[in-house]
Image: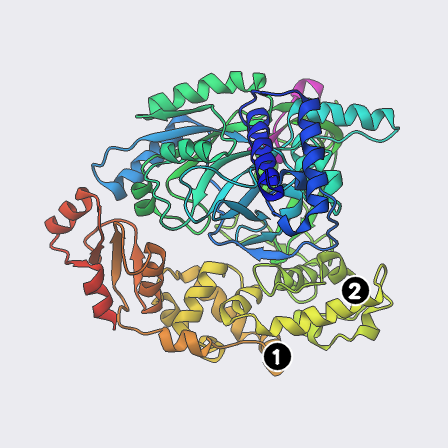
């Protein structure tokens, strides 16, 4: 046998054994025999580097050291899921979907919600080319070398896989492996890790992939995204992923009603404790991919999926003190400082009390023994007081009347849930909070500058607002605590590079109250530059799609302020983008202004996502369901009959993809 053929044969044999052991849990040879074959392959590859293969089983051992993890933009955004806690929540969700889908029969796929670190893995021509953490959903860290060490992740696929796609899932640490790791740490005199999820997540950011390879991580996969995958349902996706070599959990069920969904939920609410991994709920997805496309997404989550969260673990502990935090908008949040207590695998020391109403509702007082849960098993919250243990000298909580930071009187207007400090330009947490928002990843994304550094810069009187960032020099920041020369250079360089950030993100970065990412995009498209927006009155702002009186009032108030005007003038002089790019301006028209257009079906010339972008670029609004306000229905192949029937009953024009594209050209 030729050397190349021998190497390829060994690689294929080891891939099969690896799949049988780590994915199918059905070993066909002993560990010793596997190691002998692996060493044989390593020796052959070392002698013949000309036959290098990035997907070779020998690369599982790691050894690559990554000093900095590159930031990578996801091919498709990784959304979060809306949560539900009752059958009524699920039924309400189903009703919302039926309003969009009409009379279409909806099937659901139920899968367990594994508590790990979310990952997106890209495959091209059957080979693993990139693995990226979830990050903020838009972009994450490239952890490819570390993920390649996880033996249940295939480096080379088999079967009829598409040429390119992303597969999403969770990197998890099984209970058994976690216990073994902790036993070794305790034996070595080290502190044990607190819970499997955080340990799995931290493992992905270890610099030495050889250290990652030593950890018993696993990867459970459940979602494929990409163009032309040939997959028509979630259930088919699970089956296909298994065929291609992925480890897809067997615990899943195809359901035809919310009653069947609840049967699955109830079964695993108790049954989850027998599983080898942490789980905190059930993910319920609409099975039909076409239905998923029709339902689409909100700004944060898919309309076609819902997480049913299991009842949270609850503990009791002592509330030692209530303190108050000031947010960047001046909102005051009371915080319960607790006697440390172990809850769902983590030590809880603090819990949000939300506002004065929450404290009054439960009559929460310092010195009380309180019941603590993790909301959705993530954020600790107080859900009640054990009145049998209340001290006799207990006194009701008196909510503060002045800001704990700048001591100005607090204000609470009608309709507001919280108290506010209105010392917008003189309250330190508000000043630093606005700057921290400005530099954040979804805003200006300034590399080399973090929240702690912002606090230091403010403390040292080097910055008073975000415009001051653009006058910083290396010599000014170098004396800061923990600031090396390279760090100082990166900070100044990161600030300088941020002037390339597009207008809509700069607008979001300004931190105007109620102006989030989506609203900033709409305002940028409507006014095209900052000068036009600064001159807008409330009436014209309300005329913009989805801009209400509260947002309009906040925008006008922001731009009427002389301090804000001065800051924006400075930012302009530093070269920030305060107008849409030439490309955006060229592509943008008002041809569809005031028109709501619904898109349904599968399209040939452009994708559904591109079609929606074209509508918005030309001034139109994308509707999710047919109503009397719908101007057009753009019908693609395989469109549901219910949409066509409703459009015809309301005399709404139905156009093809070609007809629509001709309309805007």
Which of the 4 quarters of the picture holds residue 31?
top right
Which residue is the site of mark 2?
487
Q: Secondary structure at mark 1?
A: helix
Q: Residue at x 42, y 32 (%)?
A: 238
Let me know if residue 371 appears in the view: yes
Measured along the vertical axis of the image, is residue 252 above or below residue 135?
above
Let me know if residue 407 appears in the view: no
- Quadrant of the snapshot with the N terminus: top right
Q: For the residues carrying marks 1 and 2, which lies nearer the camera in this image?
A: 2
Which residue is the site of mark 1?
566
Q: Which residues are magenta?
A: 373-389
Q: Residues within 10 Å of mark 2 (few under 14, many from 20)?
A: some
Task: Tell whether position 180 is magenta.
Answer: no
The x and y percentages for residue 572 are 58, 80
Which of the 4 quarters of the picture holds residue 216?
top right
- Earlier residue among tags 1 and 2: 2
| Along the line of sight, the residue nearer the viewer: 405 or 155 | 155
Which of the 4 quarters of the picture holds residue 483?
bottom right
The x and y percentages for residue 55 are 59, 44
Tell me, for residue 296, which label it has, or none: none
């Amino acid at each position: 046998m030729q050397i190349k053929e021998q190497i390829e044969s060994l690689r294929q044999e080891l891939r099969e054994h690896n799949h049988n052991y780590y994915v199918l849990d059905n070993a066909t040879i002993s560990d010793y025999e596997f190691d002998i074959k692996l060493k044989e392959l390593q020796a052959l590859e070392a002698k013949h580097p000309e036959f290098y293969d990035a997907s070779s089983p020998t690369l599982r051992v790691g050894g690559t050291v990554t000093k900095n993890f590159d930031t990578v933009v996801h091919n498709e955004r990784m959304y979060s899921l809306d949560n539900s806690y009752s059958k009524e929540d699920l039924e309400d969700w189903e009703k919302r979907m039926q309003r969009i889908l009409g009379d279409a029969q909806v099937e659901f796929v139920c899968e367990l919600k594994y508590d790990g670190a979310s990952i997106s893995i890209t495959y091209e021509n059957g080979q693993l080319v990139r693995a990226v953490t979830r990050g903020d959903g838009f972009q994450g860290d490239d952890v490819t070398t570390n993920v390649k060490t996880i033996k249940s992740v295939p480096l080379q696929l088999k079967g009829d896989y598409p040429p390119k796609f992303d597969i999403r899932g969770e990197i998890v640490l099984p209970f058994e492996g976690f216990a073994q790791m902790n036993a070794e740490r305790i034996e070595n005199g080290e502190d044990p890790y607190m819970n499997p999820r955080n340990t799995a997540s931290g493992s992905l950011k270890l610099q030495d992939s050889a250290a990652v390879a030593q950890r018993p991580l696993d990867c459970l996969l459940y979602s494929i995204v990409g163009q032309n995958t040939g997959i028509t349902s979630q259930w088919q996706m699970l089956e296909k992923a298994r065929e291609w070599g992925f480890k897809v959990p067997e615990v899943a069920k195809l359901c035809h009603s919310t009653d069947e969904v609840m049967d699955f939920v109830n079964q695993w609410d108790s049954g989850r404790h027998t599983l080898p991994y942490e789980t905190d709920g059930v993910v319920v997805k609409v099975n039909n991919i076409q239905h998923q496309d029709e339902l689409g997404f909100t700004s944060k989550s898919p309309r076609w999926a819902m997480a049913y969260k299991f009842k949270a673990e609850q503990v009791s502990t002592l509330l030692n003190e209530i303190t108050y935090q000031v947010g960047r908008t001046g909102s005051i949040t009371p915080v319960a400082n607790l006697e440390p207590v172990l809850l769902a695998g983590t030590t809880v020391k603090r819990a949000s009390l939300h506002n004065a109403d929450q404290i009054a509702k439960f009559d929460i007082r310092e010195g009380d023994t309180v019941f603590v849960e993790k909301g959705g098993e993530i954020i600790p919250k107080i859900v009640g007081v054990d009145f049998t243990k209340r001290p006799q000298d207990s006194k009701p909580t008196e909510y503060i009347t002045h800001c704990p930071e700048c001591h100005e009187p607090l204000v609470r207007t009608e309709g507001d849930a919280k108290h506010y400090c209105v010392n917008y330009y003189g309250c330190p947490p508000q000043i630093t909070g606005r700057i921290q928002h400005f530099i954040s990843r979804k805003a200006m994304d300034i590399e080399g500058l973090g929240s702690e550094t912002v606090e230091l810069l403010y403390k040292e009187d080097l910055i008073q607002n975000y415009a001051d960032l653009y006058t910083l020099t290396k010599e000014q920041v170098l004396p800061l605590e923990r600031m090396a020369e390279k760090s100082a250079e990166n900070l100044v360089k990161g600030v300088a590079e941020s002037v390339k950030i597009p207008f809509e993100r700069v607008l979001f970065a300004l931190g105007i109250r109620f102006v989030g990412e989506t609203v900033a995009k709409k305002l940028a498209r409507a006014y095209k530059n900052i000068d036009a927006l600064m001159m807008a009155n409330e009436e014209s702002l309300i005329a913009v799609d989805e801009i209400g009186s509260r947002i309009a009032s906040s925008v006008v108030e922001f731009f009427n302020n002389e301090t804000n005007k001065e800051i924006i003038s400075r930012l302009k002089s530093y070269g920030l983008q305060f107008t849409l790019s030439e490309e955006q301006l060229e592509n943008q028209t008002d041809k569809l202004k005031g028109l709501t257009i619904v898109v349904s079906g599968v399209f040939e010339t452009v994708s559904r996502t591109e079609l929606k972008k074209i509508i918005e670029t030309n001034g139109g609004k994308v509707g999710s369901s047919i109503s009397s306000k719908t101007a057009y229905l753009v019908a693609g192949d395989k469109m549901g009959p219910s949409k066509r029937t409703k459009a015809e009953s309301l005399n709404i024009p139905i156009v093809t993809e070609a007809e629509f594209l001709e309309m805007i050209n």
